[in-house]
Amino acid sequence: MSNSGKLIIFAAPSGAGKSSLIKKIIKDSENNLELSVSATTRLPREGETHGEDYFFINEKEFNELKSNQAFLEFADVHGHQYGTIKSFVDEKLKDGINVILDIDVQGFTQIQKAIIKDIISIFIIPPSLDELKKRLVLRGLDSNDAIDKRLENARKELEQAENFDYLVLNDDFNMAYNQITSIIFDKDYEYNVTNNKNILEDLLN
Ligand code: 5GP
């Protein structure tokens, strides 16, 4: 894939606050930064718009895209299919636009193997698994079954977090936001990976 923009990959367990952080970063950014709109077989939630939040498609359409090699990566997440549309990302990168991918760790692993020069990968860590559950219940978007599934996946995702370039703890929203903008925009930003690795280890033990 030829490119001049940067690909910035965000992953996190569901409820870690990734979407809110990404929304604010894009809104505040005067730089060339856009979110890639993925395709999914999940049904739209209230307030979600086709083409803005996702391209909501059915299984048949998703499988057709898969057979046509239209995805940069795709994965089954919490029982639904999700995929990054190659042409969508490629066009933006070619135009020099930096593209944010909000994907899960399976997708990240696939993209690591793709031939893309400039990738920054960021994993958002929640303060604790209990806090994660609290946030998922409070946001009221998912059924109890869906919440249980998301928590089960959270542990698996956290175990993969070490493979990302940066680990960012989202205990305090503004601190996490500042850290991410430094990672993305500040060339001289010094990052202490050990601190956040310790937090990750505590969380898993
Ligand atoms: P939600 O259903 O809450 O919008 O997203 C569920 C999970 O799917 C999130 O962790 C999100 O990052 C992930 N996801 C969204 N789009 C994609 C995609 O295109 N590929 C992959 N692998 N995961 C995605």
Image (spheres, helix red, strand yellow):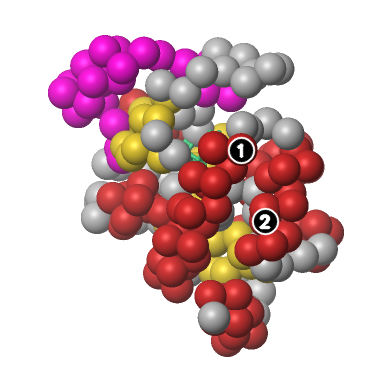
Whole-percent x, y for residue 44 in the image: 57, 18
* Magenta stretch encompasses residue 76: no
Q: Nearer the viewer, residue 29 or 167?
A: 167
Establish if 155 lies above or below 31: below
Residue at the image position 83 percent from the left and 59 percent from the top:
174
Q: Nearer the viewer, mark 1 or mark 2?
A: 1
Disc 2 is placed on an element classified as helix
Q: Residue furthest front?
A: 144
Q: Within 10 Å of the Cα at label 1, are there few (<14), some (14-19), or many (20+) other Cα atoms?
A: few
Establish if 17 lies above or below 168: above
Q: Is residue 202 visible?
A: yes
Q: Is residue 193 visible?
A: no
**Which residue matches tag 2?**
132
Q: Which residues are magenta?
A: 51-73
* Magenta stretch encompasses residue 63: yes
Q: Residue furthest left?
A: 67
Q: Nearer the viewer, residue 94 or 73?
A: 73
- Quarter of the image with the C terminus is bottom right
Mark 1 Cβ and ligand 1 under 8 Å apart:
no
- CA gap between label 1 and label 2 equals 14 Å
Disc 1 is placed on an element classified as helix
Q: Within 10 Å of the Cα at label 2, are there few (<14), some (14-19), or many (20+) other Cα atoms?
A: many
The amino acid type found where label 2 is placed reads Leu
Residue at the image position 45 percent from the left and 59 percent from the top:
157
- Quarter of the image with the N terminus is top left
Q: Quadrant of residue 156?
A: bottom left
**Which residue matches tag 1?**
144
Q: Nearer the viewer, residue 205 or 144?
A: 144
Whole-percent x, y for residue 30 in the image: 74, 41
Residue 19 is labelled as none
Residue at the image position 74 percent from the left and 52 percent from the top:
134
